C-alpha cells in the first residue's frame, strides 16, 4: 500500500511540474503575441528570450545546489562506531562553515549550539522571504505575475537554505521540493479567480475603520483588501511550507520521513503565517486606508471650498443686484416726482388768476 501511495504521489508530482511548465510557456506565448502586434516579427525573439530566462531561473539554483555536498543524516540503528563517525563528520563540517560564529561554536565542541544558530538563521530567512511574497503578491493582483514571483522566490529560497547549511537534499528530495514549487506556482496563478471578500470580509472590516461603511463608494476598498490579503496569505503559506521542507532536508539533524516532514512543515507554516499576516497585512491596510482617507479628505475639501466660493459669488451677485435695484428705484422715484411737478405747473398756468403755491 505504501509503494502504491508513493507511485501516486510521483505521478501527481510529474503532472504538477509539467502543468506548471505548460502554464509558463502559455504566458510567454501571450507576451510574444503582444510583442508581435507592437512590432511585426518581434514575437519569436521575445518568446525564446523569455524561455531562456525561465530555464536559467530554474536550472541555475539547481546547478548550485548539486555542487553542494549531500546532507548526511545520523544512521538508523547504528553502532557506536558509526555514530561516532557521524558526529566527527558533523563537527568538521560545521567547523568549516563560512559563518565565523557557527564555526567557532563547532570548533569548541558545542555542535548543538552551532546547529541552533543555523536553525535560527534559516527560520529568519524563510520568514523574511514569505513576508516579501505576501506583500508582492497582495499588491500585484495578477495571477500570472504572482505565479512567476512565487516560482522565482521559492527556487531562490531552496538554494539559500542549502547554501546556509552548505548541504543539499538528495535528488529524490529535490524532485519533491521542485514539485511543491510547481504546485505553489499553479495555486498562485489561479488564486485571482477566487473571491475572498465574503470569507475574509469580517477580518478586514475589523482592521479597516468603520468609516468605510459610512462613506459611499469605500465599501469596495474593503473587498479589495480582503482579496489582496487572502491572496498574499495563501502564497506566503506555500512559501513557508516549501522553505521549512527544504530546511528539514538540508539540516543534518535527523533522517526525514516524508509524511512527518509534510505534517510538521504545514503546522509550523500555519503558526508563522499568523504573525506575518498580522504584521504585513496591517501595514497594507493602513497604507491603503490612509490613501483612501487622503483622497476622501481632498474631495471633501474641494467640495467645501467650492461651496464657499459659490456662496461668496452668490452673495456678491445678490449684493450687486440689490444695489442696482435700489439705484433704479431711486431714479424711478425722482422721475415720477419731476413728472408730477411739471403737470401741476402746467395746470396752474392754464387757470389764470390762480396763484402758484409757495
Image (spheres, grey):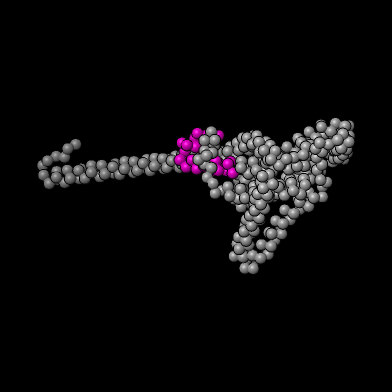
Q: Return the x and y of residue 35 as percentages of the image width and height.
A: 62, 63
Q: Main secondary structure of the magenta part?
A: helix
The answer to whether residue 207 is above or below residue 181 is above
Q: Is residue 277 among what the camera can see?
A: yes
Question: Closest to the observer: 54 or 349?
Answer: 54
Residue lying at 82% horizontally and 47% vertically, measured from the top left: 68
Q: Return the x and y of residue 123 as percentages of the image width and height.
A: 73, 37
Residue 220 is inside the magenta segment: yes
Q: Work out which residue is located at the far front of the displayed protein and give it.
A: 1
* Quadrant occupied by the C terminus: top left
Question: Closest to the observer: 147 or 313?
Answer: 147
* Quadrant occupied by the N terminus: top right
Q: Work out which residue is located at the far bottom of the displayed protein and give it.
A: 41
Side of 198 where 143 appears, left or right: right
Q: Return the x and y of residue 242 as percentages of the image width and height.
A: 69, 43
The answer to whether residue 145 is above or below residue 161 is below
Residue lying at 49% horizontally and 37% vertically, measured from the top left: 212
Residue lying at 53% horizontally and 42% vertically, measured from the top left: 196
Question: Closest to the observer: 182 or 302?
Answer: 182
Q: Return the x and y of residue 238 as percentages of the image width and height.
A: 65, 43
The answer to whether residue 86 is above or below residue 65 is above
Residue lying at 76% horizontally and 53% vertically, measured from the top left: 60
The answer to whether residue 48 is above or below residue 143 is below
Residue 326: quadrant of the picture? top left
Span shown in magenta: 207-232
Residue 278 is inside the magenta segment: no
Question: Closest to the observer: 57 or 304?
Answer: 57
Q: Is residue 265 among what the camera can see?
A: no
Amino acid at each position: 500500500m505504501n509503494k502504491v501511495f508513493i507511485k501516486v504521489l510521483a505521478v501527481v508530482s510529474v503532472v504538477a511540474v509539467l502543468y506548471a511548465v505548460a502554464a509558463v510557456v502559455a504566458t510567454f506565448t501571450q507576451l510574444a503575441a503582444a510583442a508581435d502586434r507592437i512590432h511585426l516579427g518581434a514575437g519569436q525573439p521575445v518568446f525564446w528570450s523569455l524561455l531562456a530566462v525561465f530555464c536559467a531561473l530554474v536550472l541555475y539554483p539547481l546547478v548550485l545546489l548539486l555542487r553542494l555536498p549531500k546532507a548526511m543524516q545520523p544512521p538508523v540503528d547504528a553502532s557506536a562506531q558509526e555514530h561516532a563517525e557521524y558526529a566527527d563528520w558533523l563537527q568538521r563540517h560545521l567547523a568549516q562553515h563560512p559563518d565565523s560564529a557557527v564555526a567557532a561554536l563547532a570548533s569548541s565542541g558545542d555542535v548543538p549550539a552551532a546547529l541552533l544558530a543555523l536553525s535560527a538563521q534559516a527560520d529568519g530567512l524563510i520568514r523574511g522571504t514569505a513576508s516579501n511574497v505576501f506583500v508582492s503578491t497582495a499588491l500585484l493582483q495578477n495571477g500570472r505575475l504572482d505565479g512567476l514571483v512565487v516560482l522565482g522566490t521559492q527556487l531562490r529560497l531552496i538554494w539559500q537554505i542549502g547554501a546556509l547549511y552548505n548541504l543539499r537534499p538528495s535528488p529524490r528530495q529535490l524532485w519533491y521540493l521542485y514539485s511543491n514549487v510547481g504546485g505553489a506556482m499553479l495555486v498562485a496563478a489561479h488564486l485571482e479567480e477566487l473571491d475572498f471578500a465574503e470569507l475574509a470580509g469580517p477580518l478586514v472590516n475589523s482592521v479597516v475603520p468603520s468609516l468605510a461603511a459610512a462613506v459611499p463608494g469605500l465599501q469596495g476598498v474593503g473587498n479589495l483588501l480582503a482579496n489582496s490579503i487572502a491572496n498574499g496569505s495563501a502564497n506566503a503559506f506555500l512559501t513557508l511550507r516549501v522553505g521549512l521542507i527544504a530546511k528539514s532536508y538540508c539540516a543534518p539533524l535527523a533522517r526525514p520521513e516524508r509524511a512527518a516532514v509534510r505534517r510538521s512543515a504545514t503546522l509550523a507554516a500555519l503558526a508563522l503565517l499568523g504573525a506575518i499576516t498580522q504584521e504585513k497585512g496591517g501595514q497594507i491596510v493602513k497604507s491603503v486606508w490612509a490613501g483612501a482617507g487622503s483622497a476622501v479628505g481632498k474631495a471633501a475639501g474641494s467640495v467645501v471650498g467650492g461651496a464657499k466660493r459659490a456662496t461668496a459669488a452668490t452673495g456678491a451677485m445678490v449684493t450687486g443686484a440689490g444695489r442696482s435695484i435700489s439705484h433704479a428705484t431711486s431714479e424711478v422715484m425722482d422721475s415720477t416726482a419731476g413728472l408730477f411737478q411739471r403737470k401741476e405747473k402746467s395746470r396752474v398756468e392754464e387757470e389764470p388768476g390762480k396763484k402758484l403755491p409757495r
